[in-house]
Each structure stands twice: as structure tokens, then as C-alpha cells.
């Protein structure tokens, strides 16, 4: 459960690096054990420039409470976790058997969903309803916006109803679906009677009729003309008729396809295996020989593919190479301040990323590595290193905060958290049953509630069962405990 969220030392932007690694930590100090009553309770504390963070772990990894300057959360693993943010509008959230159920709320209202299929929301402003929604996808829809009634809709599939701004259409209406449907976009309405076999289109000057998949013809003067036979095998389309050079598409699949616009010409023979693409701005030429295996593209982007043996592409500033696809992949790109290099083997079995400063006067370098499912390692480039033994989920969900906080700690058999510059660190085994710490003032070893040993120049000692028998030294003074009484 380690995840770097802040690196305010040499570079404030180092937070870009490991914002999703394994446990929320700060820069200045490592997590240190307070009291160890394992498995009943283990207290952890971390000091940072913006405040103190605390964790209380109960019943090993199964119950945990975290408190920090920006966020508090409580987890009962593996069942659920609740977050409370220290931010305007009092944001809070709850997840149960994630991703089965989630709930997110602020002072104006809340949103919830059950496996993204059953969901609802309710929001108010000054006591007045802004929106109220409920949905059982794809059977029931009820969206109420009192102040903007044009956005409201209701529907029960297959009997009667409508939805708005869904399924890539401005409005979809049905009566005894699929026997009667209406599909609206850009002032046009297509009627399906029944969908998808019989269609006719009107509105906005458009007209057309189709008996899918055998034939169809649609047109809108000044905008487009579209015809097909035996969809999708034979088609002809001319669109953007209001431009100086319209876009033309036609094809007789799989033998031949052609597309031309003011910025592009593309032909395919025995689609999709052979063909070429010419684009003028930005300039680019691509030739395809038995696509997707042999592709040569020059210009912007750059593509040199000899699949599956070797592929090299440069798209939007990302330089990507594949070796024996899908085995080994390398990606590199630059941000305003960083040079980033990423390697992966079979996508997630091995994944490593390194970030270095582009400023030649800086020695900043940070990295993170996952070897699934065995371990994860991170160095935030600002004197903070972390390691966790067994991380089967994080490599799959690198950016998922809930997986990191709720599930990942269940597998953390061993953890390391260290600051190399200060030579301080903490190692924990079996969910803090055994902890070993190196501090500025000395060292410490705990074995649950059984044994606590600390060493240092100024103070040290040992305690058995939290004072049943023990010795404590502070400076030149020493005191003993027996049966929890000071002698």
C-alpha cells in the first residue's frame, strides 16, 4: 500500500512521478511505529512539512484508519472503505466490495452506482432541487432537471420512453422497442420500424430510406449523400458538401476502399491488408503490406512496423518500440521538465518507469518498478524509497486509489520504507507483527506486544508485554518495570 503523493524537496513537480505507487507518504520522514499491540492494534506515525499523518491498524491488515492534513479514511478489508476529504464542499465517498458499489457525496448532493448498471444521484442548491436521477441500465431511465426541463427524460425499455445525449445521439425515443424507434441528431430524425431493419429519415432537409442490411440511401442537400448495398460490403458516401473539397468514401469490401478529403487520400486493396495513406498537413505517407504486420509510415507520425518482431512509432511525442510483440515494449517521452522512459514485459508481468530531469544542472532521478505479482519498488527522487513484497493488484490498477488503499495492503507480507539521505528506514513483516526501525536517534525492534527493544546514545531499553518486565534508560538514568509498575 505504498504511493508517493508529494515530493517538496528539490522539486515540487516530483509528485508527477509516483502519484499512484503503494501507500500515501510524504518526503521528510518514514512511517514509524508508535505502540504495537498486534494483532489488536498497531499505531504508525509520520511527520511532514504540512502536518502529521497517523495510521491505526486493527486485526492485522483487516481494519485500518488513516488521518492526514488532506484526507481521512477508514478501511474494513476486503469489504469497504470510506474517504473524507479536507476540502471545500466536504467531499466524501464510500466503496463496498469495490467495484460493486460506490457512493460519492458533497454538501450539494450525492451520486451512487451499483456495478455501474444501477445508479442514481441527487443535487440541490439552497434547498432547491437541481437534479434527481435514477437508472437501471438499459431498462429504466429517470432523469429530472427542474431548472432545465429540456434535459429531463424518462424511459422504460422496451415499452416506452426516451433518453437524451446517450448512445452518440441527441435523443433516442422508443415505443415497444424495437418495433418503433426515433434517433435524433443535428436536426434529423431517423425512424426505425422495426429497428434496425427498416429506417426512414426526415428533418433538416434530409431524406432517406433503408432496408437493412440489403440497401439504404440517405441525403441532405449541402451536407451529405450516403448509399449502401449489403451493408457493410458496398457503400458510397460524400459528406462535408459545404466545404471546397468534400470528403468522399466508397468501397466494395473486402476488395477495395477509397477515401479522399482536402487533407487526405487513402486506398486499400483486399481491405484491410494492403494500402496506403497520404496526408498533407502534417505531412505523412503510410504504406501497408499485409496489415497489421508490415506498415511503413513516414512523416508525422512515424511508423516502422515489422510485426510481430519489431515495431517503432513516434506519435504525439511518444517514442514507442515493440520487440517480439507482445513480449517487450519500451516507451519514452518528454514533459516540460522530465525525460520519461518506460519498459514492460507482457504488459504487466514486468513494468518499470524512470524519470530524469531535463535540466543538465539537476541530478533528479526517480523510478518505480512492478514485478507481478511478487514485488513493487519506488524511488521518488527526493530521498524516499519503498518496497512491498506481493502486489498482485497494483500493476493492473496503477492509478486506482481505492484498489491501493482497500485491497493492496492485504498482500503486503513485507514492507520497506526508507529515507536514504537521512539513513532512516522501517521494515515490517506479517502486517507489522515484526518491525525493525532505524532512526536518527537509534534503532527499534518490536515483536507484536511481546517484545519492544530500542537502542540509542541518549535513550534505550526493552519492554516485555508492554511493561510486564522492562528496562528504560534516558541519559544516565535507568528505571525498571515489573508487573507494569515502575521500580
Image: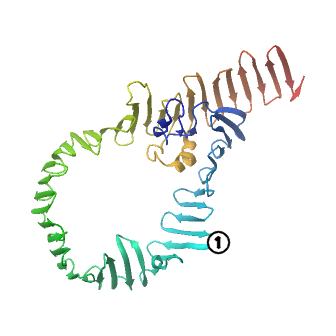
Q: Nearer the viewer, residue 87 or 309?
A: 87
Taking the spot 20% from the left edge, 44% from the top edge, the residue there is 303
Q: Position of residue 49 (x, y in %)?
A: 62, 34
Q: Position of residue 100 (x, y in %)?
A: 53, 60
Q: Nearer the viewer, residue 374 or 82?
A: 82
Picture quarter containing residue 150? bottom left
Q: Nearer the viewer, residue 80 or 261?
A: 261
In this picture, is 381 found above or below 227? Answer: above
Q: Nearer the viewer, residue 174 or 36?
A: 174
Taking the spot 60% from the left edge, 29% from the top edge, the residue there is 427
Work out whether residue 306 can be spotted: no
| Quadrant of the image containing the N terminus | top right
Residue extending furthest toward the top = 476
Taking the spot 57% from the left edge, 48% from the top edge, the residue there is 406
In this picture, is 452 found above or below 149? Answer: above
Q: Secondary structure at mark 1?
A: loop
Q: Position of residue 256 (x, y in %)?
A: 9, 62
Please count the marks in the image.
1
Q: How is the image coloured?
A: rainbow
Picture quarter containing residue 172? bottom left
Taking the spot 38% from the left edge, 81% from the top edge, the residue there is 173
| Quadrant of the image containing the C terminus | top right
Tag 1 residue:
127
Left/right of residue 305 with respect to residue 380 in the rendered view? left
Left/right of residue 30 with respect to residue 308 in the rendered view? right
Amino acid at each position: 500500500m505504498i504511493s508517493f503523493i508529494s515530493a517538496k524537496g528539490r522539486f515540487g513537480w516530483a509528485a508527477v512521478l509516483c502519484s499512484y505507487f503503494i501507500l500515501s507518504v510524504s518526503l521528510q520522514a518514514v512511517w514509524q511505529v508508535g505502540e504495537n499491540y498486534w494483532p489488536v492494534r498497531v499505531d504508525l506515525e509520520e511527520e511532514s512539512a504540512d502536518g502529521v499523518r497517523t495510521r491505526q491498524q486493527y486485526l492485522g491488515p483487516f481494519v485500518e484508519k488513516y488521518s492526514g492534513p488532506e484526507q481521512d479514511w477508514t478501511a474494513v478489508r476486503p469489504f469497504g472503505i470510506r474517504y473524507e476529504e479536507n476540502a471545500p464542499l466536504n467531499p466524501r465517498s464510500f466503496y463496498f466490495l469495490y467495484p460493486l458499489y460506490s457512493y460519492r457525496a458533497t454538501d450539494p448532493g450525492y451520486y451512487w452506482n451499483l456495478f455501474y448498471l444501477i445508479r442514481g444521484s441527487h443535487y440541490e442548491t439552497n434547498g432547491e432541487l437541481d437534479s434527481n436521477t435514477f437508472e437501471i441500465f438499459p431498462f429504466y431511465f429517470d432523469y429530472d432537471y427542474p431548472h432545465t426541463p429540456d434535459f429531463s427524460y424518462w424511459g422504460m425499455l422496451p415499452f416506452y420512453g426516451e433518453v437524451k445525449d446517450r448512445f452518440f445521439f441527441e435523443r433516442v425515443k422508443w415505443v415497444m422497442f424495437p418495433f418503433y424507434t426515433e434517433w435524433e441528431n443535428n436536426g434529423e430524425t431517423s425512424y426505425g420500424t422495426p429497428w434496425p431493419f427498416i429506417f426512414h429519415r426526415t428533418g433538416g432537409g434530409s431524406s432517406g430510406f433503408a432496408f437493412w442490411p440489403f440497401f439504404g440511401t440517405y441525403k441532405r442537400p449541402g451536407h451529405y449523400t450516403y448509399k449502401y448495398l449489403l451493408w457493410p460490403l458496398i457503400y458510397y458516401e460524400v459528406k462535408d458538401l459545404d466545404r471546397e473539397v468534400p470528403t468522399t468514401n466508397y468501397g466494395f469490401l473486402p476488395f477495395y476502399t477509397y477515401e479522399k478529403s482536402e487533407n487526405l487520400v487513402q486506398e486499400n486493396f483486399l481491405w484491410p491488408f494492403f494500402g496506403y495513406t497520404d496526408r498533407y498537413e502534417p505531412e505523412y505517407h503510410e504504406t501497408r503490406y499485409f496489415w497489421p504486420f508490415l506498415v511503413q509510415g513516414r512523416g508525422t507520425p512515424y511508423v516502422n512496423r515489422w510485426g510481430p518482431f519489431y515495431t517503432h512509432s513516434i506519435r504525439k511525442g511518444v517514442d514507442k518500440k515493440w520487440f517480439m510483440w507482445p513480449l517487450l515494449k519500451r516507451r519514452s517521452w518528454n514533459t516540460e521538465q522530465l525525460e520519461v522512459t518506460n519498459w514492460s514485459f507482457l504488459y504487466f508481468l514486468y513494468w518499470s518507469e524512470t524519470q530524469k530531469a531535463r535540466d543538465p544542472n539537476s541530478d533528479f532521478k526517480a523510478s518505480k518498478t512492478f514485478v507481478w505479482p511478487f514485488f513493487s519498488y519506488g524511488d521518488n527522487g527526493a530521498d524516499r524509497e519503498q518496497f512491498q513484497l506481493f502486489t498482485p493488484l497494483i500493476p493492473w490498477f496503477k492509478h486506482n486509489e481505492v484498489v491501493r488503499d482497500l485491497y493492496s495492503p492485504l498482500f503486503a507480507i513485507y514492507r520497506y520504507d526508507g529515507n536514504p539521505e537521512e539513513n532512516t528506514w522501517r521494515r515490517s513483516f506479517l502486517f507489522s507483527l515484526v518491525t525493525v526501525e532505524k532512526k536518527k536517534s537509534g534503532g527499534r525492534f518490536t515483536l507484536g506486544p511481546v517484545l519492544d527493544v530500542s537502542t540509542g546514545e541518549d535513550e534505550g531499553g526493552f519492554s516485555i508485554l508492554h511493561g510486564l518486565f522492562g528496562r528504560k534508560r534516558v541519559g544516565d538514568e535507568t528505571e525498571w518495570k515489573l508487573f507494569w509498575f515502575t521500580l
